[in-house]
Image: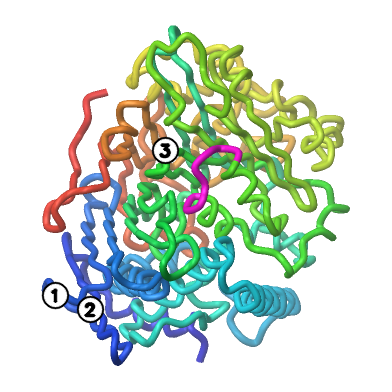
Amino acid sequence: MTVIIVLFFLFSYVVSLPNEKTITVAYDEQRQIFQLTNHPVSNWAAKAAFNNNINQTGWAYLDIETNPALDNDVQAYAAGLAEGQLTQELISLHWRNTAYTCPEPYTPFCQRLRNFLTQNLNWVKSQIDAHQNDQYWEQVKLFYMQTAGLQDGYFNNPKAPHMDIDIFGLYVFQIGGDMEDLEPALNKPTSTRVRGSGSCSALIKLLPGNKDLYVSQDTWDTYNSMLRILKKYTFPYTVNGKNSDRVPGTTMTFSSYPGTLMSGDDFYQIDSGLVSLETTIGNSNADRWKYVQFQSVLEGIRSQVANRLAVTGEQWASTFSNFNSGTYNNEWLIVDYKLFERGMNSLKPGTLTVLEQIPGLIVFRDTTSVLVQQGYFPSYNVAYFPEVFNASGGPESVKKYGDWFSYDGTPRAKIFKRDHVKVGDLKSMQKLMRYNDFQHDPLARCNCTPPYSGENGISARCDLNPASGTYPFGALGHRAHGGTDMKLTSFELFNNGMSFIAILSPTYDQQVPFQWSKTDFPVEEFPRFGHPDLFKFPTMFFNGSAPLNSYPIEVIAV
C-alpha cells in the first residue's frame, strides 16, 4: 500500500477543523526520543501554535519556534513533527485537492520520475556525507530533516532525527513547482502546463522622494490550491553544526500551503533584512531540458538555503545559484531593506538584486539603478535579462504568437507602466496589485472572441472568460485559474516584526467574487475539499508573532 492510499484513508476520518491548537515537542536527549504534548515542558525542542481561520479570513496561521540549545538536526526534525501533527487535517484536504500522485502500477513517466527523484535524493545524501562541515550542505540536510519530521508528525510516529522520506509521500508538496519542468524534462507524453499560463505578478515600487519602498506579489494558480497558511518559522540554526554562529536568517514570515515547508508562492520576509520573492518565467526551449540532471538541488530547497545563509542580495543570488536544477524556473527579486532609508537622496547599490534561472543558466545583477530610473520594477512571467529571454525560447514565442510573449509588450507590462505612477500609499498599491477590469481596459484586449481576456490583468480571473469563447492559445481561455492572493509589505511593516498585508481571494475589486457553486468547473476535475464556497475575504494584517494562544489576525484599513 502506498502513502498516497494511506493519506486518502486518513482523510475519511476528518470531521471538523478545530479553530486553534498548540503543541510542544519534548526531546529526551539521552534516549533520543521525541514526544508530542499539549503542555509546556522544560525539555522542549519545538513549540507551535496553529489557528484555522479559513472560513473567516481565508487563511490559517502557523507559528513554530525551535530551541537554540539543541543541535540543528533535532531542531529541524522537531519543527517538522510539530507542523505535521498540527496541520494534519489541512494536509489531508490539500492532498486531495492538489497533490501530484503516481499510484502503482507506475506509468512509464512515473517510473522515470521516481528514478530521477530517488537518484537525486541519494546524490544529495552523498554530498551531505562528503561535506560534513560545509554550511551549504548543512542547510540542505536540515530541510530534508524537517521534511522527515513533517512526514512522521503527520502519521504521529516520531523517531530519532533522520532523512528517510517517501518520494511519493509528503515530499511531493516540496517539489510541486519543480514538477512543472520535470514533466517536459522527463518526457511526459501529455503535459498539464497550459501554453502561456501566467504565474504570479510582482512589483517593487519606489515612492517619489524615496519616502517608502513597497514590495508586493500576487500568486497565480489553479483555484483548487486555495487552502492556505501564513507562517512564521523561528529556527535558530547554527551555520555548520555545533559550536558555530547562528545563521543570519533565523526567522521568516511567509505565505505557504499545508504540508509545504517553503512558501511555494514564493514570498519571504527574513530577519537578515531581506525580502525574497519570485515569479515564474519558465522555459520553452526544448534543447535546454538536457541540463536537468539529478546531480542538483531542487529549486525550493535552494531558496530556503539562501534565505538562511545570505545577508545581502548578491549573497542570496550566489548561494541560490549553486547546483542549479533547471526546474521551477523563476525570476527572483531580492530587496535589502537594511540599505533603505526614507527620504534618502539616492538608493544604495544592492537594494534590489534580480536573478533569473533556466536549465543550464543563471544570471543575476544589481538592478537598483533600474529601480531608481523607472521608479518601479515589475515581474510577470517573462524573462527580463536578454540572454535568459533568448535562451529560453522567448523570441520564437513572440514570432509565433506576438508581443503577448514579450517582456514590455505583454498586457501586464503595459498596465504596470501606465498605472504604477498612481501608487502613493498602501491603499493605492493594493488597488494596483488587485486590478483587473478586462472587459473595459483597452490593454486587456486580444485577438479573441469576445475581444478580451481575464488573463490580461495584474490579478487574473480566467474563470470569467466564457467557455464558448475562442482564443489563440490556452492561457487566454476559460480556466479555473487566476490570481488567488495578494501580499504587500513596506519599509515600516517590514521593520515591525516582518509584517505584511495579505488577502486571499481572486480579485473582486472590479469583478464579481469567485464562488465555487456558481462555476461550471466539475468537482471531479477541480476538487475543493475544505474550501469555503465564496471567496470574498477581507484584507488582513499578519505580524507573525503573538502569544501562542492568541494569533495576530486583524483587519487593516487600506
Give the residue at mark 3.
Answer: 273
Q: Between 102 and 46, which is closer to the camera in this rendering?
A: 46
User: Regarding mark 3 in the picture, which secondary structure is present there?
Assistant: loop
Q: Looking at the rendered structure, which numbered label has been put on residue 32?
A: none
Amino acid found under the numbered disc labelled 1 = Val
Q: Earlier along the polypeptide chain: callout 1 or callout 3?
A: 1
Residue assigned mark 1: 41
- Whole-percent x, y for residue 232 in the image: 32, 52
The answer to whether one can see residue 222 in this image is: no
Task: Tell me if I can see residue 431 in this picture.
Answer: yes
Residue 72 appears at what percent x and percent y? 40, 70
Residue 495 vs 91, above or below: the answer is: above
Residue at left offset 66%, top offset 78%: 126
Residue segment shown in magenta: 307-314
How many numbered discs? Answer: 3
Give how far apart the Cα atoms at labels 1 and 3 are. 32 Å
The residue located at (54%, 19%) in the rendering is: 376
Query: Quick one: label 3, few (<14), some, or many (20+) residues within 10 Å?
Result: many
Dominant SS type (magenta): helix
When the figure is inspected, residue 195 is found, relative to residue 75, above or below; the finding is above
In the displayed structure, 213 sits above or below 515; it is above
Q: What element carries label 2?
A: strand
Dividing the picture into quadrants, the one containing residue 553 is top left
Residue occupying the point 40% across, 42% down: 269
For the residue labelled by badge 1, is the local secondary structure a helix, a strand or a loop? loop
Residue 28: x, y in percent?
A: 25, 85
Tell me if label 1 and label 3 are in contact, CB under 8 Å: no
Mark 1 and mark 2 in contact? Answer it, CB < 8 Å.
yes
